[in-house]
Image (cartoon, helix red, strand yellow):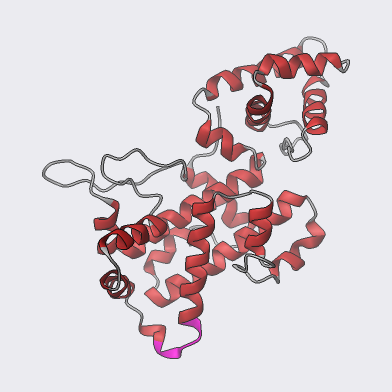
Amino acid sequence: MNIDNLDDSLARLEQDCDFPSGFCLGLLQESDWSFVIKLHALLESAVSQLLVNAVARKELADVFANLEMSNMKTGKLAFVKALDLLPRAHLDFIRGLSELRNQLAHRVTNVSLNITEYFSRERQKRSTADARKLADKWGFALQDGDKRSDPMARYHFKVTDSKSGAVESREKIFFFIPKRVILMSAMAILDAISMSNRYGAHIWTFLMECEDRAHFIKKAEGIFAKAKVGNPDYPFEVKEILERHNPDLKVKLDDDGQPILESLAGALYNVYQCRGSVETILDLVRKFGI
């Protein structure tokens, strides 16, 4: 399975959004004020790109680009939510970043922001439980001690105690180095967007929820194998029947115009969730003369 690694995924997104190579990680070198402003601009551009790809209408690029980011009724995130393109934790993070960005942009004095001190003050305003929720909101891509990670990021970063080797709690690390933790979570969102752009929105469910991805990859490989021994159009025919009976499903093509193996495997899994088995799906394909 040749799903992109995180570096490839982010590099692809930087290219799609016309940002210079290495822009994501380079944000750590910015001042805290500039970090928030530029990170928000990157996410805003990426979300616009996600929407363009989701509806497959490039002519809407300027329309999406000019929408307000976080208005949940008429903004970009309203479309993302309606189309179910990102999980709720991602939307909450983006809305929080938008609120912080707006605070900073509207007062010149905020250019001297110290993000660690800012969140330290926010922590003092909250109860212990609410402080933990704040850390969860901003740091969902950070492993939280020995707790099982929620399926919100393909890669969970972790910080271990130098002596015991135990994984530190999310809350402790977030309030200690909030800038780095925020970037980790933003990278998880950008990775999800990049993967969706490349393989289709259904890839996220496949990667984050499917416990037997190899099974569906094997089924997709079988479809391509059949194409090599007698019916070169078979992958396209399977793609067409899956999309016809599942209007929200779009199997992506590679640069040579061929269905992408991982996208087809993800589509099989997503339809499997509704129909119960891959064999049922392929029986449906055969029933319609394919």
Query: Residue drawn at (73%, 39%), measured in percent from left and top?
Result: 255
Query: Residue drawn at (73%, 37%), measured in percent from left and top?
Result: 249
The reply to whether the magenta stretch includes residue 105 is: yes
Figure quadrant of the C terminus: top right
Rendered position, 248 above or below 111: above
Question: Residue 244: percent from the left, percent from the top?
Answer: 83, 32
Outermost residue on the top side: it is 229
Q: Quadrant of residue 287?
A: top right
Question: Residue 149: percent from the left, percent from the top?
Answer: 38, 41
Rendered position, 4 above or below 241: below
Query: Residue drawn at (75%, 62%), measured in percent from left and top?
Result: 61
Outermost residue on the right side: it is 289
The segment highlighted magenta reads: 104-109
Q: Quadrant of residue 273?
A: top right
Question: Residue 115: percent from the left, percent from the top?
Answer: 34, 73
Which residue occupies the foreground of this view, 129 or 209?
Answer: 129
Q: Is residue 39 visible?
A: no
Which residue occupies the foreground of this view, 210 or 126?
Answer: 126
Q: Is residue 217 visible?
A: yes
Rendered position, 108 above or below 103: below
Q: Main secondary structure of the magenta part?
A: helix
Q: Is 156 displayed left or right of 260 in the figure?
A: left
Q: Is 181 displayed left or right of 188 in the figure?
A: left
Query: Residue drawn at (40%, 85%), measured in percent from left and top?
Result: 110
Rendered position, 127 above or below 142: below
Q: Quadrant of residue 201?
A: top right
The reply to whether the magenta stretch includes residue 59 is: no
Question: Residue 1: percent from the left, percent from the top?
Answer: 55, 27
Q: How many marks?
A: 0
Q: Is 192 displayed left or right of 256 in the figure?
A: left
